[in-house]
Image (spheres, rainbow, N blue to C red):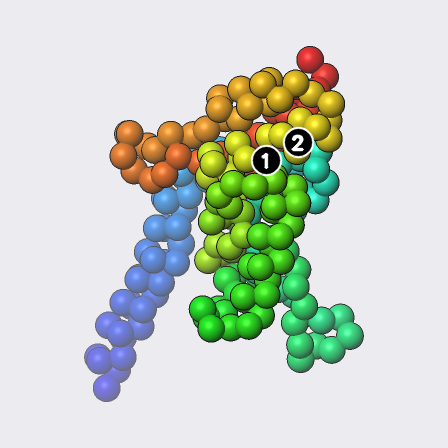
Amino acid sequence: MLQHIRPAVVLLVLFSALTGLVYPLVVTGVAQFALPRQANGSLIEKNGVVVGSALIGQNFKTDRYFHPRPSATTDTDPNDSTKTIDAPYNAANSSGSNLGPTSQKLIDRVKASVEAWRAKAGSGPVPADAVTTSASGLDPDISPQNALAQVPAVAKARGLDEANVRALVETSIERPAFGWIGEPHVNVLQLNLALDELKSS
């Protein structure tokens, strides 16, 4: 019996070391060498202080900033641990709403988002990503159409020339990788940081 147990134990220890220690250390080392910024969370700094990540959306509420797409993330209700409450951009609980197209809650939320959008941006087409949530609830990017439609409100709130704000958005558009992978998009945090610099320039 020992002759059967010994090889099994040896293999268990060997593969535990290979897959649980050696492989993760090698992958981590390669990532730190080849792509250190991405491996450390694509952190964004301002004046030496980390203000966020290029991969995780943040909730900008005032008209002085561009707004990200809505977030459906939740958190535990502090008054009742068996329930949840809305907690937009909760990075500790990435999730979509799981609400279907017949959900009245979803219909009411989208209608409210459309009305809020119209009040801010006026008439015209409403970009889909301005009123719908992403699957993660943490999407850091919006479509160029969404960003450009917000230009008048942001420029007015800051007292800036609308043409300058529009030009800033256009230079912030990230094109598809290699010209065809993905969609054009604008990172909201990076755009808002550039917007603060525009104010001081």
In this orientation, does residue 129 appear? yes
* Secondary structure beneath label 1: helix
Q: Amino acid at mark 1?
A: Gln
194 in relation to 11, above or below: above
According to the picture, the residue beneath numbered tag 1 turns out to be: 150
Question: In the rendered image, which quarter contains the N terminus?
Answer: bottom left
Could you tell me residue 130's position as x and y percent?
53, 47
Q: Which labelled disc corresponds to residue 154? A: 2
Could you tell me residue 112's position as x and y percent?
62, 58
Which residue sits at x=27%, y=34%?
180
Could you tell me residue 8's position as x and y percent?
26, 74
Q: Amino acid at mark 2?
A: Val
Please identify the residue farthest to the bottom as the structure is shown: 1
Residues tagged 1 and 2 counted as in contact (Cβ below 8 A): yes
Determine the CA span between mark 1 and mark 2: 6 Å
Q: Which labelled disc corresponds to residue 29? A: none
Q: Can you tell which quarter of the image residue 152 is in?
A: top right
* Secondary structure beneath label 2: helix
132 in relation to 47, above or below: below
Which residue sits at x=67%, y=68%?
85
Q: Residues within 10 Å of mark 2 (few under 14, many from 20)?
A: many
Could you tell me residue 163's position as x and y percent?
58, 18
Left or right position of 86 against 176: right
| Residue closest to the eye, 46 or 180 | 180
Q: Residues within 10 Å of mark 1 (few under 14, many from 20)?
A: many
162 in relation to 19, above or below: above
